[in-house]
Image (spheres, coloured by chain):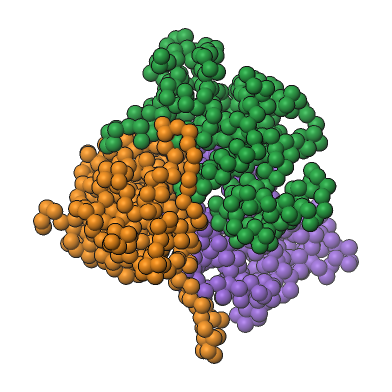
Chain colours: A orange, B purple, C green
Amino acid sequence: MSSDQPILETRGLSKQFARRPDLAERIAAVFGAAFDARSVRAVDDVSLSVSRGEVLGLVGESGCGKSTLGRMIAGILPPSSGDILYNGSDIRTHAVPGTAPADLAVQMVFQDPMSSLNPRKRVLDIIGEAPRVHGIVSAADSDQYVAELLHQVGLDASYRRRYPHQFSGGQRQRINIARALAVKPAFLVCDEAVAALDVSIQAQVLNLFMDLREAFDLTYLFISHDLGVVEHLSDRVAIMYLGRIVETAPTDALYRDPNHPYTRALLQEVPRVGAGRRRFTPVKGEIPSPLNPPAGCHFHPRCPQATARCRNEAPALREIAPQRFSACHLNTDS
Amino acid sequence: MSAPAAGIVRDDADRPLRALWREFARSRSAVFALGVCVLLVLLAVCAPLVAPQNPYDLTAIDLFDSRLKPGSSSASGMIYWLGTDGQGRDMFSAMLYGLRLSLLVGVLSGVIAIGVGVALGLIAAYAGGRIDALIMRIVDFMLGFPTILVALMLLAILGQGVDKVIFALIVVQWAYFARAVRGSALVERNKEYVEAARSLRLGNARIVFGHILPNCLPPVIVIGTVQIAHAISTEATLSFLGLGLPITEPSLGLLIANGFSYLLSGLYWISVFPGLLLLITIFSLNVVGDRLRDVLNPRNRK
Amino acid sequence: MPDNLLVIEDLHTHFDTPQGVIKAVDGVDLEVGGGEILGLVGESGSGKSITGFSILGLLDAPGRVARGSIRFKGEELVGASPERLRTIRGREIAMIFQDPMMTLNPVLRIDTQMIEAIRAHESLSEKAARTRCAEALERVGIPSPEERLNAYPHQFSGGMRQRVAIAIALLHRPALVIADEPTTALDVTIQAQIIHEVQLLCAQAGTAMIWITHDLAIVDSLADRIAVMYGGRIVENGPAADVIASPSHPYTRGLLDSVPSRNRRGSRLAQIPGMTPSPLNLPAGCAFQPRCSRATEACTAPPPPREFGDGHSVRCMHPLEQAA
């Protein structure tokens, strides 16, 4: 295994949600009625790679498919097409029997501190169940194991007898993280893991993420809509719009010199502390519905620099500089 | 605008059963009703010990003592506190044994119906698609018929007997639970803690029964208590109509039926006392069920 | 000091619960001048939303204004009759909520709702009212307003709905608008649009605004003045630029330092230790004291307000040094 093989790679990953005909519609179809199969391409041909130990930030607004992508990578949602490779081999084929399945290596930390913990289970069970079931720790040792995990995420070990409703939002997120760590993953997908938290608690949890990355040699796919958070934590950033990746670059380069018009709009229009009073000149238009994406480049209706080519042809993700990729015709037009 | 989230840690918040009891006990009538239920169950269980006479023992009954008023005494000096029926049975003893049978039939059929209904409802919700459609169509079909009608038809085919009555009652009850649980389970299925369980590669059976089921229990508990009461009254109706339990093992319903013909002659105690006992049983169960429903209502929590 | 539109003095809003009295707002003093945008900043549990509701008398039992005074254009609102409050709401003071579906009725068409809102305070013919509505929708940037009036709320996206809610709020050109986290649930680009529109509208009509939020970045770019709330009290109040550039209260400082963009990339974020106190159990004296690195014995007594020049005030025993 070469050392520069990415720990996780997706190739042409897509997810379509199609409405299947129900019985009445199938009967109608027999008689020749057309079936309105409205399908949503939530994720459209995404190819990403993440190197071991890095933090890849994934930024986008609602409907861009970032959560769907995260869930496919974590194995919760089956892809419609494309491959997910973990350490070079397809994530769906399991490792050697007797060891923990390869797909336990990718775990997810969820957004909503309320609904992401089972309200009827004690913390001890929430965290300790999976490692026990998978044989990572014996039933006798699980109590101690959970206590240590709680300590590592900054919670008092005595809390393990409690129920989720007895904790605050920030504490619940820590339990969430401990649950993911309990199966000794190498890769964490953090889906808006700090979005629901207050600023001061967010800082604590972000620091925790950074500490854990060091301590456990973790790799993160950090999904967020918050550009400030992503900038702080990530080594590289990918921007998604309506199911497609529109730009990927190392963080510094992206924030200093964004290439894609959508990235530029995002960075300019997000309020930042310390920038002071200013006039907003936001990008016009609404985010299109994923049910009805614009033809060609998805962003063209809102792009101040759209050309005829943009309306008809979807731009491919091209390398415009070392490590930098962007999907925009303006890079290729002379 | 509702009160802001206080984020308080209540001292018994990590003992959910105790917190449940505290809430429940706030209503004194509910506690009283619960007490009555417990008493009735104890009486039923200990019937052989409490009842002065075994009403099924033909040698103990004296036909000469039939139709005696409440308070009369027998030749051997036993006082018939609630009178005797047409065969000379002590009403009090007959009622206790009748209660025993009624509770047995009601609770057993209820519990098994819960088991079947909950399992099918969970499977329907989690599996989705065709399995869901199939199970729910069967449920709709079952719920489309009046309970009594289906039970009558089944018993007409199967004949009399305790086991057959229990079977018929299970058949007519499971659909309510299946529907209630499926609704809850559908909501829970989309929650993130279920996704987390799938991310952790816990098996489907474990997720459905270990994770989703505990969150679907409140409506089941509420419907369960009320349904058990309903099962008891249905059995009474069936017995009253002559189908259901055989005469040799009278439940409360059958006792009422037997005594019915004597009502107009003024021998009220043969029907009325078992009727009252039946009423008290069903009423107490319903009060407990109502209180449980209020306490377990998720909107009232926290 | 300009003639103050809204003056809140020593406001206390309490909730009586079986567990005790929740002091959601515990002694708040605020002033908003005509045409001014005040950013009311705080985290969850700080009491900022309840302050907004208290102004308009929108508290449900068991909440009540325990004491204090809220004077709007000189008129006392605390204890005012429900009829008077109803006249003021919508006409003089309007409110925008975080969830636009708190303003919009999902089963009524937009024109029905808006026309009803107009005719509640003015007698206009239906046609004239409808024209006003179309104009209002146009002003908030909704394309083809005449057609959109016939639509139902669910046919709009989240951002559009919020725009409609803002249009309704501005129908009667109120003197003051209270906006409770109006953009928190919206996407970043839509948020920018809404803030832009609100800026324009307030500038054009001279409307004053209280923008309640937890997002310091928004108030920095939008507000004239900032008031920071913690534990039901205002801990710092002053011109936006001053408060951001040289915060005086340790909590404000801590909040600002927690923001990722203010820290060197990749470094550990400066974090405030601990958690917000439970409103049932506020510490005596300064509410921030258990988490403050500068706390001393003196902080167990309620800190008096200290004024720096230019209307910048702070409640702290040991305020941070002001930049010269």
Residue A57 locus on image (x, y percent):
31, 48
- Can residue C213 be seen by looking at this rendering? yes
The answer to whether B271 appears left or right of B175 in the picture is: right
- Can residue A107 be seen by looking at this rendering? no
Q: Is residue B8 above or below residue C235?
A: below
The answer to whether B190 appears left or right of C232 in the picture is: left
The answer to whether A249 appears left or right of C246 in the picture is: left
What residue is rendered at 44% in x and 9% in y?
C297
The answer to whether A271 appears left or right of C119 in the picture is: left
In the displayed orientation, state which residue is furthest to the left: A2
In the displayed orientation, state which residue is furthest to the right: B265
Residue B135 locus on image (x, y percent):
52, 73
Q: Split into 4 quadrants, where in the image is the N terminus of chain C?
A: top right
| Residue A74 falls in image quadrant | bottom left
C177 or B203: which is nearer to us?
C177
A187 or B140: which is nearer to us?
A187
Q: Split into 4 quadrants, where in the image is the C terminus of chain C?
A: top left
What residue is rendered at 39% in x and 70% in y?
A312
C4 or A193: which is nearer to us?
C4
Residue A78 locus on image (x, y percent):
35, 66
In the displayed orientation, state which residue is furthest to the bottom: A31
In the displayed orientation, state which residue is furthest to the front: A334
